[in-house]
Image: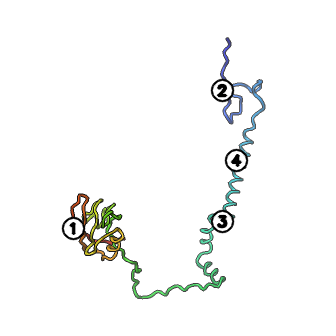
Amino acid sequence: MEQTALRPRPMPGDGGGGGGESGGGPDSGPPARRPERRRGRRLMTVLLGVLAGVVLVLSGAGLGAVGATVVGAGGLAELKRQTGVAPTPAPAPSAAPRSAPSVPVVTRLGVEVADDRRPGALVVAVHVPGPGSSAGLVRGDVLLAFGATRVDSAAGLARAVARARPGDEVKLTVRRRGGGYQQLTAVPGIVT
């Protein structure tokens, strides 16, 4: 029985036939044209990249940021003048100190509530740290009263908390998970 010799196949880019042959044998075939093919592929890749860049620029991708930089504030005023829109004059600086912008203050208790089957607001989450956590509220409590206001639902609690003043102590009437009732003192805060 005759044993066949396994010859390694030539590696891509390897100019010779591999295995130390001189290339003149019957298996050598035509000479490889690898360097020219690579140059053609590189050229094609560069051309496709340039084409993609031109398409993106012509389609306006990224043109907004470039346009804002080029036009600038002076160019924008010129454009408004051409379209007939009168530019608003800049406010004159005054010697009086500026007051902070008027922002509505919203009071928070630091709890997430849902409607309970019975009257009250079921506490489903307590934000730590927060006014509810400091007062001793825990998940599963049912808020029945907020100060002098009876709480029938989660929306009722939200209205009562919104009417409260931040920093003022408020008595909470709570039904615990075990069935007992407890009075807690909370100090509603604001979100900064």
Answer left or right for 65 relative to 177.
Answer: right
Answer left or right for 122 relative to 63.
Answer: left
Q: At which x and y percent is residue 60?
A: 66, 65
Compared with 89, 125 (above or below) is above
Q: Secondary structure at mark 4?
A: helix
Compared with 44, 160 (above or below) is below
Looking at the image, is mark 1 or mark 2 earlier in the sequence?
2
Q: Which residue is mark 4?
A: 42
Please give the name of the residue rendered at 68% of the width and 33% of the height, measured from the top-left corner.
14
Kind of residue at disc 3? Gly
* Image quadrant where residue 68 sits: bottom right
Q: Which residue is mark 2?
A: 8
Kind of residue at disc 2? Pro
* Image quadrant where residue 128 sits: bottom left
Q: Which residue is mark 1?
A: 183
Q: Secondary structure at mark 2?
A: loop
Kind of residue at disc 4? Arg
Q: Is there any visible trace of residue 127 in the rendered image? A: no
Q: CA distance from mark 2 to mark 4?
A: 29 Å
Q: At which x and y percent is residue 40?
A: 74, 46
Answer left or right for 179 relative to 19.
Answer: left
Disc number lying in front (1 or 2): 1
Q: Which residue is mark 3?
A: 60
Kind of residue at disc 1? Gln
Q: Secondary structure at mark 1?
A: strand
